[in-house]
């Protein structure tokens, strides 16, 4: 089991923003570029947040739900066939203050072994060496838990996480679980993530959308030293997770 050592204190967290501000910011997402090779990606001088996960874990649905755009992230009918890194810019009034990166899903055998190895290496190189990478969102189907491939990815990024790279495990398809199953999935996920952030998410029920959007906004807008202390929101994440789980369970039962 991969465990992350807590990163050194990176200073104050981001300035205050409510969920409405964060969600509205996510809705500004627009296509930037696509690349089949790492060297084809343009340099980025704003925070970059990567979405990664096993094929069919709900990654495209998550991105489309967060950005409120049905086809921003392409979801192939054949899992494992989308083999490009797609970048989307975020920012109001045409300005870019963050970039989302949609990485190819992994774990399906719909491509040749040669192509699979090539793309695994591209992903590893991206996660290890991309200078603008600020945070990673790992999407996982809680019914399967973290797979060996997910654990391998965690091991790859562990040194960067220990140096301060943000990391979130997002347990998708929460609407398919009961309240008790969601609570159990959160507990197991937190253990597997070594104490890292873990949240439930449902594109169908929009569970966890506001909370996830706010966290990504905070990643992309770190506070400066002169940010007033009273401008920093304090969120009870455990209570929010429990409330989300209860709401989704009540809606699905």
Image (cartoon, grey):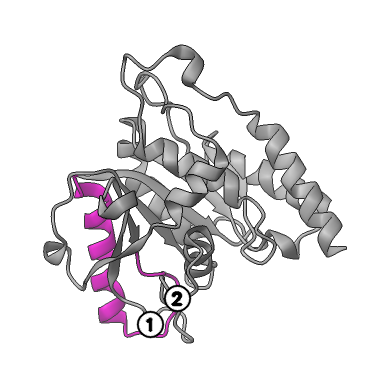
Q: Observer-nearest residue: 152 or 100?
A: 100
Q: Residue at x 30, y 38 (%)?
A: 160
- Look at the picture and state if 6 lies above or below 207: above
- Residue 12 lies, in percent from the top left, at 39, 19
Q: Is residue 102 magenta?
A: no
Which of the two discs, 2 and 1, labels the residue nearer the N terminus? Answer: 2
The residue at which mark 1 appears reads as 81
In which quarter of the view is residue 207 placed? bottom right
Q: Residue at x 37, y 59 (%)?
A: 29
Q: Residue at x 49, y 86 (%)?
A: 77
Q: Observer-nearest residue: 69 or 109?
A: 69
Comparing labels 2 and 1, the label whose residue is closer to the camera: 2
Mark 1: few, some, or many residues within 10 Å (few <14, many ≥20)? some
Q: Residue at x 61, y 57 (%)?
A: 145
In which quarter of the view is residue 190 placed? top right
- Residue 201 lies, in percent from the top left, at 62, 55
Could you give the CA–CA distance between mark 2 and mark 1, rounded to whole angstroms? 16 Å
Q: Is residue 122 magenta?
A: yes
Q: Observer-nearest residue: 63 or 180?
A: 63
Question: Helix, strand, or loop for circle 1?
Answer: loop
- The label shown at residue 71 is 2
In which quarter of the view is residue 20 placed? top right
- The part of the chain drawn in magenta is 103-131
Q: Is residue 192 visible from the viewing direction of this image?
A: no
Question: Helix, strand, or loop for circle 2?
Answer: loop
Contact, mark 2 vs mark 1 (Cβ under 8 Å): no
Q: Quadrant of the C terminus?
A: bottom right
- Look at the picture and state if 113 lies above or below 242: below
């Amino acid at each position: 089991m991969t465990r992350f050592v807590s990163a050194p204190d990176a200073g104050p967290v981001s300035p205050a923003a409510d969920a409405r501000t964060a969600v509205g910011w996510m809705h500004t997402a627009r296509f930037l570029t696509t690349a089949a090779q790492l060297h084809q990606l343009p340099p980025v001088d704003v925070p970059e947040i990567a979405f990664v996960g096993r094929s069919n874990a709900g990654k495209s649905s998550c991105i489309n739900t967060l950005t409120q755009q049905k086809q921003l992230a392409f979801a192939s009918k054949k899992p494992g066939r989308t083999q490009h890194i797609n970048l989307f810019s975020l920012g109001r009034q045409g300005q870019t203050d963050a970039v989302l990166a949609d990485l190819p899903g992994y774990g399906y055998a719909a491509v040749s072994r040669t192509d699979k190895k090539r793309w695994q290496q591209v992903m590893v190189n991206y996660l290890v060496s991309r200078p603008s990478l600020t945070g990673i969102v790992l999407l996982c189907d809680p019914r399967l838990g973290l797979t060996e491939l997910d654990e391998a990815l965690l091991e790859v990024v562990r040194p960067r996480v220990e140096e301060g790279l943000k990391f979130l495990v997002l347990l998708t398809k929460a609407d398919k679980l009961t309240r008790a199953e969601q609570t159990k999935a959160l507990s197991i996920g937190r253990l597997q993530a070594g104490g890292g952030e873990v949240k439930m998410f449902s594109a169908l029920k929009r569970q966890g959308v506001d909370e996830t959007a706010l966290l990504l906004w905070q990643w992309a807008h770190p506070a400066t030293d002169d940010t007033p202390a009273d401008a920093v929101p304090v969120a009870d994440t455990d209570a929010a997770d429990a409330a989300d789980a209860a709401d989704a369970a009540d809606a699905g039962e």
